[in-house]
Image (spheres, helix red, strand yellow):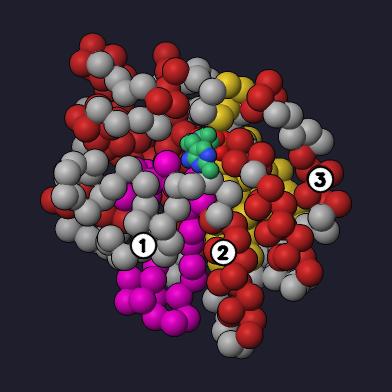
Amino acid sequence: MKNKINKLTFTSMEVRKKILELITKSKSSHIGCAYSLVDILIVLFYEILNVNKIKSVSPDRDRFVLSKGHACVALYVILSKLGFFNKKILNTYYSNNGRLAGHPVFGSVPGIEASTGSLGHGLSIAAGMALSAKLDNKKYSVYTIIGDGECDEGSIWEAALFATHHKLNNLTVILDKNGFQGYGRTSDVLSLEPLRRKWEAFNWNVKEIDGHNILQIYNSLANIKSKKPLLIIAKTVHCKGIPFMEDSLMWHYRSPKEDEFKKALCNFGDKIK
Ligand SMILES: Cc1ncc(C[n+]2csc(CCOP(=O)(O)OP(=O)(O)O)c2C)c(N)n1
């Protein structure tokens, strides 16, 4: 397990470095919220999801929906590393007529199961997929990542009701609790607390983890046995991995300037390609 964790930690550094390069080059946004979910995405795609079935679009594949679609650059980097599409395509991120838009588009590249970005909808889509699995007697599982600010959307709570009503124990939601949304701290804009008790009141099984601790992420996702849908509240840090950019709202929308890019790059050392 120790080796596995070291490998995944190394991969997360590689992914973070590539995200930094892509966001800086394209002058796009959302580095903070892409970095907060990198470790979760890596455990999902390298350890939990049946990736080969997803690649071959098997009807039995697990489904993953990135509900907080604005963080999709992290997903693109991981999909390209896993061979879902040619790495050259990655360099067209955010460019005119490119396939990798600033928000995920269903069918743009393999591995994107839903168009998201308008917040509050990914969980409903995932719940529909989970219900579909039940109706078709299929064994696949459905996973989605939502943001804490995204929980301001009423549709999140409608989907939460729907999932327990239909006993969707094949549905896992990971809530990336980085404490920010577009214009401020989530606690200042619209407080969600007591968050755990709210989801429990909606009859969900709830776990709380450190969203950057690879072992905790893995343990929370492996061998899930529950009669209810599962919500994992992952406490994360906005822009985790670049200390001078961590936990600052600025990095929701701003992209690094040349000097900031160079300073940020120092965090990754020579071994990270
Ligand atoms: C329906 C909707 N309203 C507003 C936005 C603009 N928007 C993009 S990201 C964002 C913040 C979302 O916060 P959170 O879900 O906590 O994600 P984070 O970026 O903090 O990871 C907002 C408001 C949107 N994409 N969709």
Which sits in the foreground, 95 or 213? 95
Q: Residues within 10 Å of mark 1 (few under 14, many from 20)?
A: few
Residue type at mark 2 is: Ala
Above or below, 224 relative to 272: below
Residue type at mark 1 is: Phe
Secondary structure of the residue carrying numbered label 3: helix
All told, the count of numbered labels is 3
Residue in the picture at 63% in, 85% down: 135
Give the spatial CA distance, label 3 vs label 2: 20 Å
Where is mark 2, residue-wise? 126
| Residue 261 found in image quarter | top left
Which sits in the foreground, 237 or 223? 237
Residue in the picture at 26% in, 54% down: 80
Residue type at mark 3 is: Lys
Asked if the residue at tag 2 contacts the one at tag 3, i.e. Cβ–Cβ closer than 8 Å, the answer is no
The picture places residue 138, in percent across and down from the top left corner, at: 57, 84
Asked if the residue at tag 1 contacts the one at tag 3, i.e. Cβ–Cβ closer than 8 Å, the answer is no
Where is mark 3, residue-wise? 198
Horizontally, is 19 left or right of 151 in the view?
left
The picture places residue 272, in percent across and down from the top left corner, at: 26, 35
Secondary structure of the residue carrying numbered label 2: helix
Query: Tag on residue 106?
Result: 1
Magenta span: 51-78
Residue 219 seen from this side: no
The picture places residue 211, in percent across and down from the top left corner, at: 58, 39
Q: Is residue 60 magenta?
A: yes
Give the spatial CA distance, label 2 vs label 1: 14 Å
Secondary structure of the residue carrying numbered label 1: loop
Residue in the picture at 40% in, 25% down: 253
Which sits in the foreground, 256 or 161? 161
